[in-house]
Image (tube, helix red, strand yellow):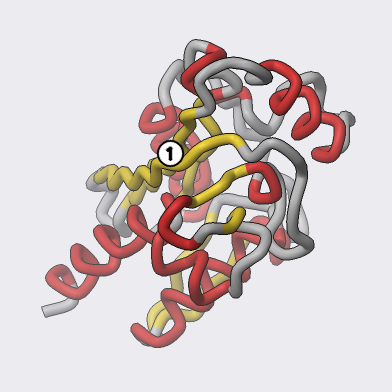
Amino acid sequence: MKEIMIATSNAHKVEEFTQMLAPLGYQVRSLLDLEEAIDIEESGTTFEENALIKARTVHERLHTAVISDDSGLAVDAMDGAPGVYSARFLGYDTDYATKNQYIIDQVKDKERGAQFVCAIGYVAEDGSEHVFTGIVRGEIAPQISGEKGFGYDPIFYYPPYHATLAEVSEEQKNAVSHRGRALAKLIAFLKGEGQ
């Protein structure tokens, strides 16, 4: 079984990546499995830069294949905010219920368009670097809705489903999500690399 390291401590992300990579014969490990923390400075100004910074930092320490994603919500009426600052938006310690309500208030009586963006950085064992980007368009819901998912899912309304991403199953979400789309590109690449 091949091993791949996910440069994250987010248990939700580890779960999503594991669901998609385990069928390909990958044993997924994450920063949660390490005894010693690895400090990563996300100094990039784009999702792509941050994804590669994280993957590169972990690869330099562990010398193994690493994938890392940087993702977030970009709201049209907020000039693309929170964008690369999605996790830090309104402060790291601010809960998502507060962040979500703030965004709903910001787009009141405005255009509600938004997109989730995910860039996955992959640093192969030999150090070569690749980036795969996925985007899903939707709109900001008028209120927080749904118990599934995490982060901004309860306010991201996906018109084809007539629901927020927090109201649909994990399978439905992964089929259309920004992370699912970026992962599909990564998986196609890994399949080609494995031949």
Report x, y in % for residue 124.
Answer: 30, 56
| Relative to 2, 43 lies left or right | right
| The one of 117 and 68 positioned closer to us in this rendering | 117
The residue at 70%/25% (across/down) is 103
The residue at 80%/39% (across/down) is 96
Report x, y in % for residue 48.
Answer: 37, 32
Disc 1 marks a residue whose amino acid type is: Val
In the displayed structure, 161 sits above or below 169; it is above
**Residue 14 visible to an observer of this rendering:** yes
Location of mark 1 (residue): 117
| Relative to 34, 26 lies left or right | left
Q: Secondary structure at mark 1?
A: strand
In the displayed structure, 194 sits above or below 166; it is below
In the displayed structure, 5 sits above or below 56; it is below
Q: Quadrant of residue 187?
A: bottom left
The residue at 40%/87% (across/down) is 23
The residue at 49%/72% (across/down) is 172
